[in-house]
Amino acid sequence: MSTGNNNKPIDVPKRKSVKALAALGASVCIAGKAPFVFARNKTTLRVLGTHVTLQEEIRQQAMADLGINIEFQPGGSAAVLQKAFMAPQSFDLYEQWSNSINVLWRSGSIQSIDKKQLRYWDEINDLSKTGKLTPQAKLGAGDAPYKILHVQANGQLGTEHTDNISFLPYVHNVDSFGYNTDVVAKGIPYETESWGWLLDEAYAGKVGIVNEPTIGLFDLILAAQAKGLVQFDDIGALSRVELDALFKVLIAKKKTGHFSGFWNSVPESVDFMANKRVVIESMFSPAVAALNGMNIPVTYAAPKEGYRGWHGVMCLSAATEGKRKDAAYDYMNWWLSGWPGAFIARQGYYISNPQRSKSQLSTAEWDYWYQGKAAAEDLRGTDGKVSVQQGEVRTGGSYDKRFSNVAVWNTVMPNYDYSLQKWYEFISS
């Protein structure tokens, strides 16, 4: 057994998954931005991630508050995971979703984070630490983030709390699908809205799916089960036989033209819907907000089967040390300092210590985004456009209610390599 850093052993050789992960980048590329020019004596922090959090307003605010130079390297989720896995020396912090953790931790691409250096650790709520915001909440199948947060004495990830963690818990949300109510009749949250709609013949040729095998896969698992096409023992850990049965159905659907396309980034998903290429698709909350800001009537479903949950992870590269490492901790602490949580609330996302951001949101914003109350006034998104009309209620309700209804979390299944193989057979069929 080799050792990737001082914090943990590597129990899965990189070579085993290199070929599979290389496929992740086949149809996507990282859309980097030119670095901001700063004085030479400023530390430069390199942040690799997706467009979800790597937004220019966030970069500018962080640089102003921290006095450092920050380079954002945004791209599609599959592409950035591949880059982080293959080249930890190319970044200092990695921002994506918790389904990345097992891949990056086992490969030695990331190092542990010292909780004692996290200024707001005690403010982080129970969702990240125990898996539940309320006693009656469903834990959800798959990799609930609390299961893979703490570094155990044996170097593995588990639930016993220790001084070292694999990621900073910060942004999170529940995902489902969005649909254009000019075409698709508006359903009732938790009652009639169903993942099965993604496979409904009524929308054949107008369905979009996220091209990410640890995310889009679960949208389609939930859809196939909801339609009664395939049944699974555990939707968070499909067997090879179950994967074969699922993809037999999906490939047959694809060959009939049921799926219009597979998107790789949030902007691309917006284009799919805005250009009427699709009327229903896997979606992330910022895309829905952007479309509503364009006066396109897209509803974000609250499926009766439950949501697909995700938890943002901020990870420290195994290659980061010295001043860059100090800057990385400053940036992690900045993310939980209030302003960032308020900013991302306006695109529909939650932060792990929401009370600190509450004072930077208006009462109307807090009540709508977190409390599930009707908007007391028009609310603007992060782009400055009105994304919520006065009187609207957030689909799915309050923060507590939405996270009480998680069906499955974004997950790297035990049969991950086989699921990758089947996913790309599906995409290329």
Image (spheres, helix red, strand yellow):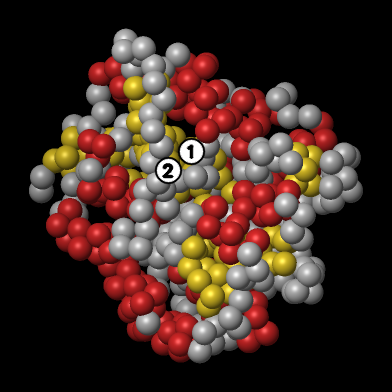
Element on which disc 1 rests? loop
Specify whether 34 is left or right of 141: left
Looking at the image, is mark 2 or mark 1 earlier in the sequence?
1
Specify whether 175 is left or right of 373: left
Specify whether 124 is left or right of 91: right
Residue 401, image x, y percentages: 71, 52
Q: Which residue is at the front of the view, 169 or 196?
A: 196
Element on which disc 2 rests? strand
Name the residue located 50 percent from the left edge and 89 percent from the top edge: 256
Q: Are marks 2 and 1 in contact (CB under 8 Å)?
A: yes
Tell me the amino acid under the disc marked 1: Leu
Tell me the amino acid under the disc marked 2: Pro
Quarter the C terminus occupies: bottom left
Q: Residue furthest left?
A: 1
* Res 417 seen here: yes
- Mark 2 Cα-neighbour bin, 10 Å: few <14, some 14–19, many ≥20: many
Name the residue located 32 percent from the left edge and 39 percent from the top edge: 151
Residue 10, image x, y percentages: 18, 47
Real-space CA distance between mark 2 and mark 1, rounded to the nearest whole angstrom = 6 Å
Specify whether 125 is left or right of 302: left
- Mark 1 Cα-neighbour bin, 10 Å: few <14, some 14–19, many ≥20: some
Residue 143, image x, y percentages: 44, 56
Residue 33, image x, y percentages: 41, 37
Tell me the quarter of the picture where residue 352 sits: top right
**Which numbered circle lies on residue 74?**
2
The correct choice, above or below, for 113 with respect to 239 in the image is above
The correct choice, above or below, for 17 with respect to 200 in the image is above
Name the residue located 39 percent from the left edge and 33 percent from the top edge: 34
* Res 163 seen here: no
Pointer 1 residue: 54
Name the residue located 63 percent from the left edge and 64 percent from the top edge: 275
**Which numbered circle lies on residue 255?**
none
